[in-house]
Image (cartoon, rainbow, N blue to C red):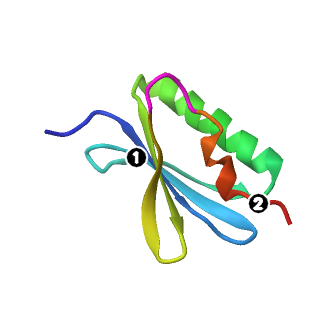
Amino acid sequence: MTVNELQVAVDVGARTHRVAVGDASGRLLEEFDLAHTAAGLSGFFERVEGLRGKHKMPVAVAIREGTGIEPHAGRFAGGVSGAAGDHCRSG
């Protein structure tokens, strides 16, 4: 059974992060870069929340740090929270 959700993958970098958003069928909906700043992180949540509203689907996030992809903060059925902020450190 395929879960109908938006799947957000974040590839964490030192200065910028690459984000891909797709649906459960594997169709790529959007790709963008995310600045390694508080403003960049805020923009990420706004953008994902906008896609959640547009597609009327819950959101699942996976964050890749180093060598693997780890699901982070589960699925967000009622919006996108700031939990992924732990992965963006200033400096």
Of labels 1 and 2, the one closer to you: 2
Q: Quadrant of the N terminus?
A: top left
Instruction: Out of 47 and 73, give the one closest to the viewer.
Output: 73
Foreground of the two, 64 or 57 = 64
Q: In percent of the image, x 61 and y 65: which residue is there? A: 12
Residue under the image location 74 percent in, 40 percent down:
42
Residue 17 in the magenta stretch? The answer is no
Please name the residue shown 49% across and 29% down the image.
Answer: 52
Q: Which mark is residue 22?
A: 1
Q: Secondary structure at mark 2?
A: loop
Does residue 56 lie above or below 31 as drawn? above
Q: Earlier in the sequence, mark 1 or mark 2?
A: 1
Read off the magenta span: 76-80
- Cα separation, mark 1 vs mark 2, equals 26 Å
- The percent position of residue 86, horizontal first and vertical second, equals 67, 52
Q: Who's the residue at 71% across and 57% down the image?
A: 88
Magenta stretch, main secondary structure class: loop
- Residue 77 lies, with reference to residue 42, above or below; the image says above
Element type where label 1 sits in the image: strand
Quadrant containing the C terminus in the rendered view? bottom right
Q: Amino acid at mark 1?
A: Gly
Residue 57 pos. (x, y %): 39, 27
Q: Residue 62, image x and y in percent?
A: 46, 54
Disc 2 residue type?
Answer: Arg
- Counting the numbered discs, the total is 2
Q: Is residue 10 above or below residue 60?
A: below
Residue occupying the far bottom of the picture: 67
Disc on res. 89: 2
- Which residue of the protein is positioned furthest toward the right in this rendering? 91
